[in-house]
Image: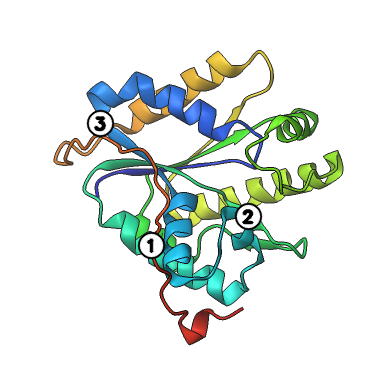
């Protein structure tokens, strides 16, 4: 693996939308690929027979979450290209508590060059979630709960940045600010640059692993 930039934000902040548009502007000359940590982890969980869909991952035990995060990390760092990692700083569990999106050994293995946190006003985030028909099982939280998650995200992002000695950039993506958010994202990626020895690999569409489910490891039982 070459250079890796972590891109995070609470669901509904517009993280993935900003990320894809920024990637379109830099992929020809900087050769970054977008990798979704959640999709990679979901594929591993499906292979292990732990879940049947993405939303069920929130209800895995803390031990199972950490083990699958580590397995996903090892898979990602084996890739040779520069990576924009679409992920989350924290995971809000079904119990309302929070799990860190990264453990110390994950950060050490990834060695990110920057953390970009895409944010928006909590009222906007709540409205976007209500309009998202692709996640019908998602809980629509109150503005206060979303604000809490945003603040915790910022605290974790700062801690991850300090732990990794990497850049931290916070980008606002409220209504009317999309173009500026993309511009700020692109400027951050260009500032970091690329590993010129990395292979220029075209990103492939994310797919969900199918096939037969393998037996669960004892340590991954919830």
**Secondary structure beneath label 2:** helix
Please give the name of the residue rendered at 43% of the width and 24% of the height, measured from the top-left corner: 22
Q: Are marks 1 and 3 in contact (CB under 8 Å)?
A: no
Q: Is residue 148 above or below residue 29?
A: below
- How many other residues sit within 10 Å of disc 3, few (<14), some (14-19) or many (≥20)? many
**Secondary structure beneath label 1:** loop
Classify residue 115 as left or right of residue 136: left
Q: Nearer the viewer, residue 135 or 121?
A: 135
Q: Earlier in the sequence, mark 1 or mark 3?
A: 3
Task: Indicate which disc residue 31 carries.
Answer: 3
Q: How is the image coloured?
A: rainbow
x, y percent for residue 88? 56, 49
Q: Nearer the viewer, residue 65 or 5?
A: 65
The nearer-to-camera label among 3 and 2 is: 2
Classify residue 143 as left or right of residue 128: right
- Residue lying furthest bottom in this view? 218
x, y percent for residue 109? 35, 62
Gap between marks 1 and 2, in whole Å?
20 Å
x, y percent for residue 137? 71, 49
Q: Earlier in the sequence, mark 1 or mark 2?
A: 2
- How many other residues sit within 10 Å of disc 1, few (<14), some (14-19) or many (≥20)? few
Task: Indicate which disc residue 211 carries.
Answer: 1
- Residue lying furthest front in this view? 212
The nearer-to-camera label among 1 and 3 is: 1
Q: Nearer the viewer, residue 109 or 191?
A: 109
Q: Nearer the viewer, residue 157 or 140?
A: 140
Q: Earlier in the sequence, mark 3 or mark 2?
A: 3
Gap between marks 3 and 2, in whole Å?
31 Å
Gap between marks 1 and 3, in whole Å?
32 Å
x, y percent for residue 63? 56, 76
Classify residue 28 as left or right of residue 101: left
User: Circle 2 is placed at which residue position?
Assistant: 55
């Amino acid at each position: 693996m070459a250079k890796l930039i972590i891109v995070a934000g609470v669901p509904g902040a517009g993280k993935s939308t900003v990320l894809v548009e920024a990637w379109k502007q830099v992929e020809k000359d900087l050769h970054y690929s977008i990798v979704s940590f959640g999709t990679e982890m979901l594929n591993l969980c499906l292979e292990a027979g732990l879940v049947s869909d993405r939303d069920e991952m929130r209800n895995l035990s803390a031990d199972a979450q950490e083990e699958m995060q580590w397995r996903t990390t090892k898979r990602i760092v084996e890739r040779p290209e520069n990576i924009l990692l679409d992920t989350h700083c924290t995971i809000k569990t079904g119990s309302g508590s929070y799990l860190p999106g990264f453990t110390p050994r994950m950060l050490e293995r990834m060695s990110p060059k920057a953390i970009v946190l895409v944010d928006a006003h909590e009222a906007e985030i709540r409205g976007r979630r209500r309009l998202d028909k692709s996640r019908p099982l998602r809980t629509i939280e109150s503005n206060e709960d979303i604000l809490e998650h945003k603040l915790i995200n910022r605290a974790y992002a700062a801690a991850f940045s300090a732990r990794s000695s990497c850049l931290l950039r916070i980008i606002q993506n409220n209504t009317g600010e999309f173009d500026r958010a993309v511009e700020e994202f692109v400027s951050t990626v260009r500032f970091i640059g690329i590993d010129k020895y990395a292979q220029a690999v075209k990103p492939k569409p994310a797919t969900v692993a199918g096939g037969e489910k393998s037996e669960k490891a004892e340590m991954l039982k919830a």
